[in-house]
Image (tube, rainbow, N blue to C red):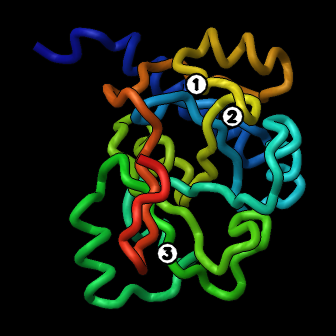
Amino acid sequence: MGNAHPTIEYMTQWHLKQAIRYLKTGGIIAYPTEAVYGLGCDPLNEKTVARLLALKQRAWQKGLILIAADYAQLAPFLEPLTPTLEKRVFATWPGAVTWLLPARAEVPYWLRGQSSQLAVRVTAHSGAATLCQHWGTALVSTSANLSGHPPAKTAFQVRRAFAQTLDYIMPGQIGGRQRPSEIRDALTNVVLRG
């Protein structure tokens, strides 16, 4: 029968192209994830990350989460995993578990914060994963909210919270989770955020 909804597919491709265009030029975008809208940017663009932290009113010392479509996109940021860590982490991915893993020494402080570890996740949200695939590497993913405020769950809420300060807001639906991703320390297996 062919594609019953060519307009939807075209618009999705158009939205992805717009998002990637803004990411490549140092922009900040908002996009749906497993439970909330996330704010994202190029993790290696210090100026853009500083702008994102200022928008959120978030201290750099806390560090940021990187999401990816697969582990290969995260590997350049991380020390090689031991077989034990690999088994523990890969059992939850793709999924809504963010792991703190040992970062390579050259990973910028603005991503790690005051830690030697980096928070990373292979996302289970198909839209966010497709965004990472088109971007070609990991992407900053922090909840779309001012620090201390509830995270946005719709594009409208993102727009209301950030007005004209974002470069692009991807349309789409968040996943079915009620709460943002769980965060675990991979070395201790301690849950830091449930």
Please state which of residues 152 and 11 is positioned toward the viewer in this rendering: 152
Residue at image location 73% in from the left, 48% down from the top = 24
Does residue 114 sit above or below 131 in this rendering?
below
Q: Are marks 3 and 1 in contact (CB under 8 Å)?
A: no
Q: CA distance from mark 3 to mark 1?
A: 29 Å
Q: Amino acid at mark 3?
A: Leu
Foreground mark, 3 or 1, reads: 3
Q: Amino acid at mark 2?
A: Ile
Circle 3 crowding by C-alpha within 10 Å: few under 14, some 14–19, many from 20: many
Q: Is residue 131 left or right of residue 97?
A: right
Where is residue 59? Give x, y as percent.
82, 52
Q: Residue 170 lies in what quarter of the image? A: top right
Image quadrant occupied by the N terminus: top left
Does residue 170 sit above or below 45 in this rendering?
above
Q: CA distance from mark 3 to mark 2?
A: 25 Å
The mark that comes first in sequence, 3 or 1, is 3
Where is residue 101? Give x, y as percent.
49, 75
Foreground mark, 3 or 2, reads: 3
**Kind of element beneath mark 1:** loop
The mark that comes first in sequence, 3 or 2, is 2
**Kind of element beneath mark 3:** strand
Residue placed under numbered mark 3 in the picture: 101
The mark that comes first in sequence, 1 or 2, is 2
Residue placed under numbered mark 2 in the picture: 29
Please state which of residues 77 and 180 is positioned toward the viewer in this rendering: 180
Q: Are marks 1 and 2 in contact (CB under 8 Å)?
A: yes
Q: Are marks 3 and 2 in contact (CB under 8 Å)?
A: no
Where is residue 48? Give x, y as percent.
83, 49
Give the numbered dot on residue 170. Answer: 1
